[in-house]
Each structure stands twice: as C-alpha cells, then as structure tokens.
Image (cartoon, helix red, strand yellow):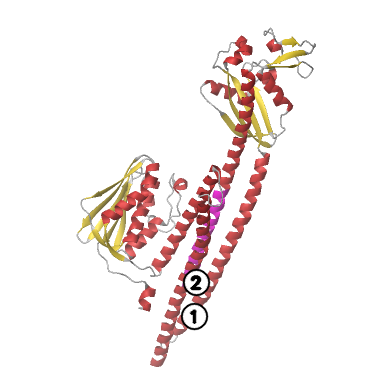
Amino acid sequence: MPGNTKALKYFSLIALVWTLIVGGSFVWNLTQQKDSMNALAKKDAIANFNKDQAFRFWASKHGGIYVKKDARTPSNPNLAHIPERDLRTPSGVELTLMNPAYMLRQMMDEFPEEYGVKGRIVSDKALWKPNEPDPWEAAAIEAFKHGSKEKFEFTMHRGEPYLRLMRPMIAEKSCLKCHAIQGYHEGDIRGGVEVVVKMAPYVENFERIKMRLIISHSVIFLVGMFLIGFGGRNFNRYLSQLQEKQLQAESFSDALEIKVAERTRDLEKANEQLKEMDKLKTMFIASMSHELRTPLNAIIGFTGILQQGLVGEINSKQSEHLERVNKAGHHLLAMITDVIDISKIEAGLMDVVVETFSLESLIGKLLEEMEPTAKAKGLSLVAEMEKDILLHTDKRRLHQCIRNYLTNAVKFTEKSGTIVIRAEELDTRVKIAVIDNGIGISREDRVKLFEAFERLDTRLRVKAGGAGLGLYVTRKIVEELLEGNVWMESEEESGSTFGLTISKKIAKKQSQEGSKNG
C-alpha cells in the first residue's frame, strides 16, 4: 500500500543514516589508529637513531678509543696510516684503536635485533665491503648530497613489514683524523646511518585495536538497527490498521445517509489516529535523538574534562586524540540536530520565535564566529550593507541559515580570497547573499542543491565532509518558517553566490501541536 511504501522509505532513510554514521565512525577511528601506529614506529626509529648518533659523536670527540686487541677486535687495516693505531701497555697488553665507525659497526653487528631494531652505517666510499650501500641506501646518500635531511619508508622484507629510516653522516672535524685520507673535508656527506624497525609488534597491536573497533561498532550498529526496525514495524502496523478503516469507510460511499454519516465519523476518527501516528513518529524520532545525543554529550563533556586536566595530567599526544574525539562528537551531534529539525518542520511542530533585531548586529556576530575558521585558510570575511536593517522575524533560524551558507563558502574555497555577505533592502523584504571565489558548481549538479543528503561530487568532497543536510535545512526554514525563498548562482572554478530573500516582518507562527492545545 502507498502508506506502507512511504513508511518503508522513511525508515530505510533512517537506517541508511545510521549505517553511514556507524560506518564513518569505524573508518575514521581505524584510520587514526593506523596513523598512530606508523607515527609511533617512526618515533621509536628516531629514538634509536639518536642513540646511535650520540654514541658516534661521543666517540668522535674523543678521537676513538683503545681496546684490547683480540680475534673479535683485530687491528683495523683502514687505520694503518695512523702511527698510534696499535699500542702496548707497560704490562704488555696490546691495544688497538677503534674509530667511531668501527665501534658503531661492531655494536650493530653484535646486537642486530636484540630489541626489534637493527642499525647500519653505510658509505659510498666504504673502506669495508659490508658498509657498501644497497640501491635504496645509495639513493638516500645521493639525496643527502642534494640537501635532503632524511629518508624513510615502510617496506616488506621476507614477508615481514619493516620501517627503514636513514639520515646523513656528515664529516666533523674530529672525523678527519681517520677519513681525511679519503679526501673528505669538514661538512662533507660521508654516507648515512640507518635504523630498521620491525613493524610486526606494532601491526599485532593494531590488529587487536581493529578487532575491538569492529566488535564495539557492530554492537552499536545492531542495537541501533534493532530500535529502528522495532519502531518501523509498529508504525507500519498502526498505519495498516488506519488504511484498512479508510477502505471500509469508502466501501459504504453509496449507502444511506446514516451510513454516510457513520463513514464520515469513521474518517474523522481515522484522521485523528493518523495525526496520532504522526505524533508517534515525531516522538520516536525525538526519542532516538535523545538516545543518541545523551552518549554523544557525555563523550563531549568527558573529553572536555580530560583535556582540562581535571582528572589528571595528559600529554600532548593524548590531548590531540581527545581533540579529535571532541570534534567528531560535535560533528555527529550537528548531524542529528539537522535530522530532528527537518522532522519537526515537515510535521509542523517547529515554533517560530519572533523578535525585533538589527541585521547588522546579526551579521557582525556571524563574522566573529566564522573568522577563526576562515583565517586558518587565508580567507577574509567582509559585510556589505548600505544601511542597517531592522527585522521582525526568527533571529535564531535566520542566523542558522546564513551560517550554513558561510560554512559551505569557507569549506569549498581553496585559495586565499574574500567571502562577502551582502544585504539589500527590497521594500517589505530583505535580500541576503553570501559570495565566494571557491571551486563553483557544475551545471548538472545545480539541480541537486537544496535536496536532502545530496553531496556534490567534487575534488573537495572527502576533505570538506558533511552529510548533505545543511542546504536542505536552510531551504525548509526559509520557505516554511521565514516566508521567503532561496536561490544561487555559480560557475565552475569562478565561485558561487548563495542567497535568500525573506519578509522583513512576519507574524508569530505556532506549531500544529501548539495550535491544537490552544
């Protein structure tokens, strides 16, 4: 039946939104965990590199060290040009000089993977064959000679993942004692010091976190789908009963006058029940919004408490992750609020709060709110008004509509420039436009604007984000609450103008529920 089809579409839309929210949360969290894994591995690699570097610098500043000569540490033939390479103590112990590179190589060879980290020192003028670079290391040394400071990559070796990190080895003055014979001068690139980190432990930890994310998001998704399915089933049952009564009433259309009167009463009763069902639908959505908003508000509140350090000190990395959680919570909360607003407007349950206010003051507040976001992208915000305009309408809803326009203008403007809010008085109406020099909108995409869940396929789609509800909510508010209309003008790569024209003065409206009670 048509009613059942409409209900099915409506609850299918709710299920789709819920799927997108949970799926988006899973993908976002998984991406963040993978980035954290890679960042931690690189941090450990740098820490080990710094340890090896400090060891080499210490040895260089001391000109090397003398150790007891044995089979493990024979005299270095590459230091034969140094007269004091070999010494004998008064007691007859033979000592040999170990230069920094010799010391570092021996340490790396004897403890190659003691802690999952392997070190290596290489040179394009290697005195010892094992110190000759492989193709990747040779390319890194060549890049160092052209100004590069570091090279790293994640790679596979023998079926296992590794991180390779290499930084240049620069000839210091203390190094020339051993290497001046090779033609090096102070400041020359002698080669590089490399650290290889096993990624297996990091990957194992990532997989454990991934499994926890899968389980937690699956539980949340299934609970949400159960609630949506339960509500949809009950709604369809009530709707089917009402449709059945309507059909029965219509079957008596040719009956006597008393039958007509009875049918009329049945229809009135059915209409009341339909209104009740619509109310139940709104209550269901409100209940769902409460169930979603409550944990989201808790997440936002608790992350705020943690960020302020009220339950203990946190480090910068933890603060960064908490900030991401906080932003994601605010984003989901805004999406839920948009869905509820749409439902209330379509059900006629949205009250209009009419007040008299200055348009110049409202626009000034909007510019102040949006300035940090615009400034971060190198954009400036400007208001153009010939004179101040007094409005008698819903200030909060007008603020919401213009802010939606401004948010989109900032999102879809890549280069630095100016975004203009222009207001013009037209007798009993006022025309407000937001003008940007962003990426613009193609001709075929313009027909999709101001529709629910429509996100245009542009190169900024992923980066800009959003659920495609902002312009739809704006159109609904302007047309059904503010007695106006929305419009736009755009050319690809030449910017866009989004505007609205509303009455300067509107009468206070009441929701259907308020009217009924009144």
> Which residue is farthest front?
90
Q: Amino acid at mark 2?
A: Asn
Q: Nearer the viewer, residue 102 or 275?
A: 102
User: In the rendered view, would you say 236 is above or below 142?
Assistant: below
- The local secondary structure at tag 2 comes to helix
* Residue 456 appears in view: yes
Query: Which of the two labelled residues, at mark 2 and mark 1, occupies the earlier sequence position?
Result: 2
Q: Which residues are magenta?
A: 1-29
Q: Pick the residue in front: 227 or 194.
A: 194
C-alpha span from label 2 to label 1: 12 Å
Q: Is residue 28 magenta?
A: yes
Instruction: Please give the residue where the numbered disc 2 appears in the rendered image.
Output: 4
> Can residue 75 be seen?
no
**Residue 209, numbered circle:** none
Give whichever of 7, 218 is nearer the camera. Answer: 218
Badge 1 element: helix
- Dot 1 surroundings within 10 Å: few (below 14), some, or many (20 or more)? few
Residue at 40% over, 56% down: 470
**Image location (x, y in percent) of residue 506:** 27, 66
Q: Which mark is residue 244?
A: 1
Residue at 42 percent across and 57 percent down: it is 469
What residue do we see at 52% from left, 51% from top? 325
Q: Is residue 293 left or right of residue 109?
A: left
Q: Residue furthest left?
A: 427
Residue 358 percent location from the top left of the image: 26, 57
User: Left or right: where does residue 200 sit relative to residue 466?
Assistant: right
CB under 8 Å between callouts 2 and 1? Answer: no
- Which quadrant of the rendered structure holds the C terminus? bottom left
Q: Residues within 10 Å of mark 2 (few under 14, many from 20)?
A: some
Quadrant for residue 69, please give it.
top right
